[in-house]
Amino acid sequence: GQQVMQIPQYQHVQEGEDFTTYCNSSTTLSNIQWYKQRPGGHPVFLIQLVKSGEVKKQKRLTFQFGEAKKNSSLHITATQTTDVGTYFCAGRDYNQGGKLIFGQGTELSVKP
Amino acid sequence: DSGVTQTPKHLITATGQRVTLRCSPRSGDLSVYWYQQSLDQGLQFLIQYYNGEERAKGNILERFSAQQFPDLHSELNLSSLELGDSALYFCASSVGGDRNSYNEQFFGPGTRLTVL
């Protein structure tokens, strides 16, 4: 079945350093979403990418969707302590029923 | 606040018991999703309902069942509980039913289930 793999599982950075998490799908995705879950909280939607090669920015966050629509990345520039949490990608493939399949998440910790 | 409510927040029970988790979606949302989150398994999709009907099934055990009522709230029933069922259970809602839609999902605060 469809699988979405995300790496790394954990990332520890010094405040001010950059951070990137990568997401890979076993099938071509119809779209991909990114969510953030703060410690003790629930996942919160960040963004959705639909088009091949799409790049979207939200302040210090840059999201990319691969040309083949099988991979995606989230890059945070100059991390801050408020960026702490687990970042999930979630891919949807309508050829596989359209379910939103979540990656395992990348837990980001930021040392001040 | 996402607008999705879940009750109870915490639930402690014993093996072999049965529990019911409740979810009220955001106003106007027709789809409800259930997820299980445990430390080593990430977010596992269990089941989706759209406007009262089952729309998609994930890795939901036969001991688990769910339904969506006419007022669109949903309940997840977990029976013959085992220690391994201890986890955080999230409900999420979205406007559409996923097919040919690109809706984001809004998550509730979750119910933490502990099976002793």
Image (cartoon, coloured by chain):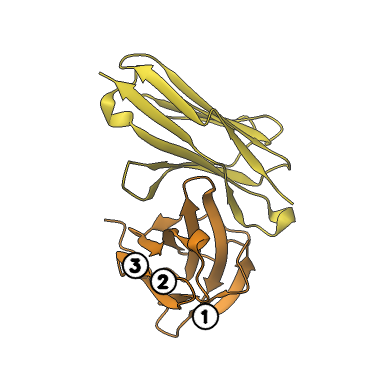
Chain colours: A yellow, B orange
> What crowding class fits label 2: few (fewer than 14 Cα within 10 Å), some (14-19), or many (20 or more)?
few
Q: Which residue is mark 3?
A: B12
> What crowding class fits label 1: few (fewer than 14 Cα within 10 Å), some (14-19), or many (20 or more)?
some
Q: Earlier in the sequence, mark 1 or mark 3?
A: 3
Closer mark to the observer between disc 2 and disc 1: 2
Residue B81 in percent (x, y) is at 50, 71
Residue B15 in percent (x, y) is at 46, 71
Residue at 59% in and 75% down:
B54
Q: Which residue is mark 1?
A: B52
Residue at 42% in and 76% down:
B19
* Chain of the residue on which disc 1 is drawn: B
Q: Quadrant of residue B1?
A: bottom left
Q: Is residue B65 left or right of residue A52?
A: left
Q: Element type at marker 2?
A: loop
Residue B73 in percent (x, y) is at 40, 77
Mark 3–mark 2 contact, CB under 8 Å? no
Q: Nearer the viewer, residue A87 or B72?
A: A87
Residue A99 in percent (x, y) is at 62, 57
Q: Nearer the viewer, residue A105 or B20?
A: B20
Q: Which residue is mark 2?
A: B14
Residue at 36% in and 51% down:
A42
Closer mark to the observer between disc 1 and disc 3: 3
- C-alpha gap between disc 2 and disc 1: 31 Å
